[in-house]
Image: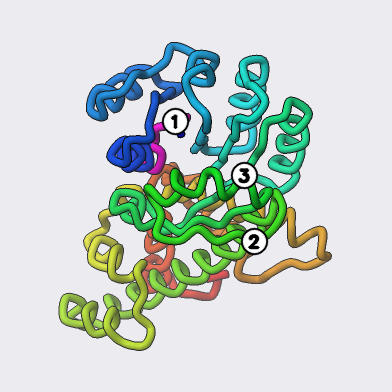
Amino acid sequence: MTVGMIGLGVMGSAMAMHLANAGLLSAVWNRTQARGQKIAADLNVDQTDDLASLADCSDVLITCVSADADLQAVIAELMPSLRAGQIVVDTSTVGVATVEALAAMLSDQGVSFVDAPVTGGAEGAQAGTLQVMAGGDDAALTAVRPALEAFATSVTHFGPVGSGQRAKAVNQVLAAGMVQAMTEALAFADASGLDTEALLPVLSQGAMGSQLLSRRGERVLAADFAPGFRMALHHKDLQLCRTLLQSMDVNLPLVEMTVKHYERLMDQGYGDEDMSALYRLKRELFTHGNRKSL
C-alpha cells in the first residue's frame, strides 16, 4: 500500500512522519509549497506539484485540512485523477453532511471514503498515539487500518460514513468542558494566592487530573498560549456540533457559553492562540468581577 498525504499542518506533518517511518508514504502535497518542500525533504519523499500527481502514485490518499471548504476543494481537484479501487481517508474535523456528500460522489467513481477524525492533539500526533474515530465501509477501513495505525494507537469503527464525525463532535463538546474547567480553576487558584507550582502536580495526579491539565496547566499559568489546538479551530468545531444539535432541537449550555467566550477573544485577535487562552477571560473575572461571566 502506498499513501499520499494531503495537508501538512501541525497534525498532518506528524502523521506524514509516522507514515514515512512505517514505509508507507509515497509523496505529500501541501497548499503552502515552501512548507511542503521542507517537510518532504526531511522525510525523504517527493512533494508533488499538484494533486493529480499525488493520486497517480498513491493507493490511499489521507487528507488533514482545516475546514469543510478546504476538503471540498481538495476532493474536487482530485476527482478527475482518481481511479476505481482507491481510498480517500479524511482525518479532518468537518460536517457530517459534508463527508456524506463527498462519499457519495466518490462512490460513483468506484472510490471508497472513510471519515477518520482524530483526537489526541499535537502531542499525540507527534508521539503517534492518536485515537481515530472512523466511519465507512468495513472493507475500506480494514484496507487502510495499517496506515491509520502508523500514527494511532486505537482505530474505532463507529458505523457508516459520518459516524466518525459524530463521535468527534462528542469529543469536542467534552473538550469545551475540560478547557472551561481547567482555565477557570487555575484562575481561581492564582487569584487565591496559592503556590500554583506546588498545586499543579497535586491536581494532575488527583481524581480530576487530565491530559489537558498535565500538558497545558503550567503553560497557561505562564500565559504561554502557543497553539497546540487553535481556538479558532475549536470554535469552528463547536459550530459543527451546534448544527448536529439543532437537528435534535437542542442547545447545550456548555457549547453556547464556550462559543460566546471564544468569540470575545477572537474579536480581540486571539483566535490563533491555543484554546487554553480562554484563561485570559477567566483571569479578568478576578480583576473586574464576575457578574457578566457568562
The Cα atoms of the two marked residues, 2 and 3, are separated by 14 Å
Q: How crowded is mark 3: few (under 14 residues within 10 Å), some or many (20 or more)?
A: some
Q: Farthest residue in the top direction? A: 49
Between residues 154 and 248, which one lies in front from this camera angle?
154
Residue in view at x 35 percent, y 48 percent: 227
| Amino acid type at image mark 1 | Thr
Q: Foreground mark, 2 or 3?
A: 3
Between residues 102 and 191, which one lies in front from this camera angle?
102
Tell me the residue that label 3 is attached to: 140
Tell me the residue that label 2 is attached to: 158
Which of the numbered marks, if any, corresponds to residue 2?
1
> Are discs 2 and 3 less than 8 Å apart at CB?
no
Q: Is residue 24 magenta?
A: no
Count of numbered marks: 3
Residue in view at x 69 percent, y 58 percent: 159
Q: Residues within 10 Å of mark 1 (few under 14, many from 20)?
A: some
Which element is circle 1 on? loop
The part of the chain drawn in magenta is 2-12
Q: Could you tell me residue 286's position as x and y percent?
A: 38, 73
| Amino acid type at image mark 3 | Ala
Residue in view at x 39 percent, y 59 percent: 153
Q: Is residue 7 magenta?
A: yes
Which of the numbered marks, if any, corresponds to residue 275?
none
In this rendering, is residue 161 above or below 77? below
In this rendering, is residue 171 above or below 127? below
> Are discs 3 and 1 less than 8 Å apart at CB?
no
Q: Farthest residue in the bottom direction? A: 207
The Cα atoms of the two marked residues, 3 and 1, are separated by 15 Å
